[in-house]
Image (spheres, rainbow, N blue to C red):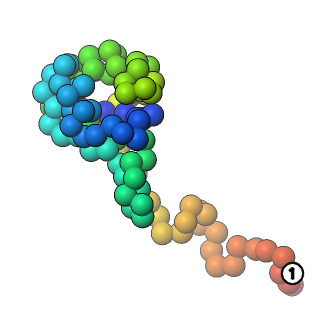
């Protein structure tokens, strides 16, 4: 089970998060997400647990609990969606508008 953990302290490490989740079962992997440009943690990460029952027990026990001075949000991670190359503007085509645009 892949678990999404948000509202992490910027001081939280992969090791400390793994130790927290190991209280509920075997942890396959932990990844705290960092900003690409600064390298600073972004305050969220993912914990992979091999057993769904143990993962759900960890979610139930840790959601909205205090860890390293912050109240955690712990949920089942949603599958990652593919990002398009259009910057989030949908299928608008070429010229999307603006001031002084001629209308024929």
Q: Residue at x 24, y 25 (%)?
A: 20
Question: Does residue 85 appear anywhere in the picture?
Answer: yes
- Horizontal side of residue 46 vs 73, given as left or right: left
Dot 1 alpha-carbon crowd within 10 angstroms: few under 14, some 14 to 19, many 20 or more: few
93 is higher (above) or lower (below) than 35: below
Number of dots carrying numbers: 1
- Horizontal side of residue 19 vs 77, given as left or right: left
Residue 104 position, x and y percent, is 86, 84
59 is higher (above) or lower (below) than 89: above
77 is higher (above) or lower (below) than 59: below
Q: Residue at x 21, y 37 (%)?
A: 15
Residue 85 position, x and y percent, is 48, 69
Residue 82 position, x and y percent, is 40, 57
Q: Which residue is mark 1?
A: 100
- Horizontal side of residue 49 vs 98, given as left or right: left
Residue 36 position, x and y percent, is 39, 61
Q: Residue at x 42, y 64 (%)?
A: 37
User: On the rendered image, what quadrant is the N terminus found in?
Assistant: top left
Asked which secondary structure carries label 1, the reply is loop
Q: Quadrant of the rendered structure where residue 10 is? A: top left
> In front here: 97 or 45?
45
């Amino acid at each position: 089970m892949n678990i999404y953990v948000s509202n992490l302290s910027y001081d939280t490490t992969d090791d400390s998060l793994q130790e927290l989740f190991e209280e509920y079962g075997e942890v396959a992997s932990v990844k705290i997400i960092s900003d690409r440009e600064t390298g600073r943690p972004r305050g969220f990460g993912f914990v992979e647990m091999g057993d769904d029952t143990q993962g759900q027990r960890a979610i139930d026990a840790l959601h909205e609990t205090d860890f390293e001075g912050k109240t955690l949000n712990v949920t089942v991670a949603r599958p990652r969606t593919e990002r398009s190359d259009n910057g989030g503007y949908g299928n608008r085509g070429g010229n999307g508008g603006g001031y002084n645009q001629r209308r024929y």
